[in-house]
Amino acid sequence: MLDSIKILNLLLPFLYGTAFSVYLFDFFHEKKSTNNSKRVILFVTLFFHAFYLVARMIEYNHPPITNKFEIFSIIACSIAFSYFILELLTDIRGTGAFIIFFSFLFQLVSSLFVADTYIVPDVLRNNLLGLHVVSALLGYSGITISAVYGLLFMILYKNIKTNKFGLVFNRLPSLEILEKLSFYSMVIGFVLLTVAIVIGIIWLPAAFPNYSYADPKLVGTFIVWAAYGVGIAMKLIGNLYGKKVIIFSLIGFLFGIMSLIVTNSLAKTFHSFY
Amino acid sequence: MNLIGISINHKTSPLELREAVHLTRDEIVEFIPSLKKYLSDGVVISTCNRTEIFGFLQLHGFDAVPLIDSLISFKPNLGIKTEHFSKYFSCGAVKHIFSVASGIDSLIIGDSQILGQVKESFEISEDLDFSGSVLRRIFETAAKVGKRAIKETTIGEGAVTVSYAAVQVVEKIFSSLDKKSALVIGAGETGELAAVHLRDKGVGKITIANRTIERAAKLSEKVNGEIISFQFLNEQLHNFDIVISATSSSNFIVSLKDVQTAMKKRRGSPIVIMDIAVPRDIDPEVKKIDNVFYHDMDSLKIIVDQNLQKRKDQLPYVENIIMEEMISFFGWYNSLDVVPTIKTMRSFFEEIRQDELEKIKHKLNEEDFSKVEDMTRRMIGRLLHNPTIKLREYAETGSNIKEVTNNTVILKELFNLIDNKSSVEEKKI
């Protein structure tokens, strides 16, 4: 089992690198052969990644969430998985390179620095915590993808406004589709964050007797969650269109990242395990 | 091959002369009988940019002047001279037909309409019993060339007219056009083209505004649209996701303030404004408003020029297809010699058999003679089976033409075969 983990640890950055390269090649050249094969490559990558995560869980006897580099691997997987589902649902295949690049980056860092962790605090062996972390990470993947599509929207928007009809104009889907992809990712991210928060609230009193709802990380996450909720509601009732939705998504993402950095690095919180 | 062709087109003559000799379908039907004096079979192609006649001459020689004269006498025009026509012969004529069908000889490279027009022209000839098997094969191959060019290259892709480029930009902004409403201001030629493109792209609702209400009504009927009063169009502007303006007005029809007001009413929902009029109809300052996508002739021309260049880059690939189909066609054409050779060879062997049987007929009883007759028939059949099959294979596939010709010549020389004239009359010498 350990050998399989070691091999997959080396193989995964290579697989994500290949998937990213094929998606990028297809973005520039739009060949029929790569258009079909890139999805297969991504599926195979995800399959091996899922196997790798399960193998780690069995071998080390805890969910793979006990250190930053295990978390990085889950982020890589959840971003790629979220994109894969989005691509299957919408059949829009031209934007994968911009998303899978993040999976490649996270997995590369994870593979380089991840260690064998047999001994971990008891609190991290809890399966409810595993579910909480996975749903939170998938939620953050959703808002990351939403931000990437938002960025692509802004680039295409600017290109059209300034009469630049080059590669970006020819290869990217329409602004309306990019807006929808960004919005759907945002909704998926929001729902998964909601799940993570609910699980956290259930599990918190049992795990930490000294917990506090005023904890900076909880407050920060709740503000991000509430902001996205308001944005989604505004879009649904018809007060946000086009560029405004995208700006909202990008600001929400930046705020979310800032909140994570501040609460993880600067503020004192019980919600820190590493 | 005594195929001949003449062509007056955008490369050889100005528009007024091309218009002067343009033939409608009815005129082609009327014109073809006069060509039968010179051609055994032929085709007349006439579009807005070219009028061409192709066919096999009744007599030997390559004199194209009678064809030109007959066209000029049918559509008299003082300005037209022989110099305005290109002339094509034999394989040059075949290559030209293939080039026309592929769209690379069109005024707008990659024009997709020409393939249908070429097919239709041949159908007229077929209806009038003015087409032989070789001509049919040429036009079938031409249709194949046209289809391959579309399928295997990008010669027909991308907008190459300003009005279509406008629609292409619209498609980069909106995805589901069936839920969008469009306003076309101006019902002239450009406005009409834009409205038709919008209809073809499935835009949900098309509305026409024009100073002359009758013209607006006529265009709206054509695109299944509606009309609004030209005077009040600014008050209705907020109701449209797409606005295309193509009038001959010398002043702005839509001002910055009009669009600002419309955007307020739309609560910022995106709007695409295409000003394809010269001089412009819409204040270009509107492009500064968020979610307003304004484009004029200059910006749309960038797309047109890019796409034309892309099509030009595809020319070598289409020319390769033409060359491949030329090789295939002439392979088939040259292999037409094989069929009469097979017939002659089998007749030659049959004559020898009959001759020898005649010699022994009186020396054998009826039963023995019948056995010998059967035996010799089987023997000849077995002897000729392989050469017949091989030659037929060459004829059917139309490949290895050099080998076919060599084998045919050797066969004829070895057995001193003389072609049966009636077998080759289908082939145009």
Image (spheres, coloured by chain):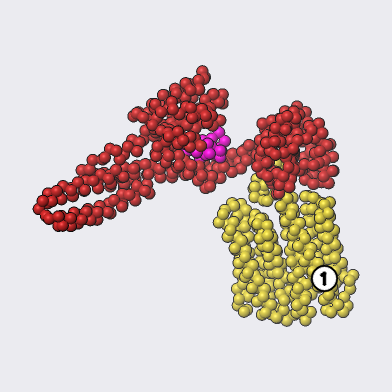
Chain colours: A yellow, B red
Verify whether residue A96 appears in magenta: no
Pinpoint residue B153: horizontal percent, then vertical percent. Answer: 53, 46
Pinpoint residue A206: horizontal percent, then vertical percent. Answer: 84, 79
Q: Quadrant of the N terminus of chain A?
A: bottom right
Verify whether residue B101 appears in magenta: yes
**Does A251 sit left or right of B124 as displayed?**
right
Residue at the image position 60 percent from the left and 41 percent from the top: B307
Residue at the image position 66 percent from the left and 71 percent from the top: A50
**Does B5 sit left or right of B258 as displayed?**
left
Q: What's drawn in magenta, residue-wise?
A: B97-119
Residue B96 seen in render:
no
Pinpoint residue B96: horizontal percent, then vertical percent. Answer: 46, 35
* Vertical comparison of A91 with A117: above or below: above
Amino acid identity at mark 1: Val
Mark 1, residue position? A198
Say few, some or many: other residues with alpha carbon within 10 Å of mark 1 (under 14 / 14 to 19 / 20 or more): few
The quadrant in which residue B383 appears is bottom left
- Subunit bearing disc 1: A
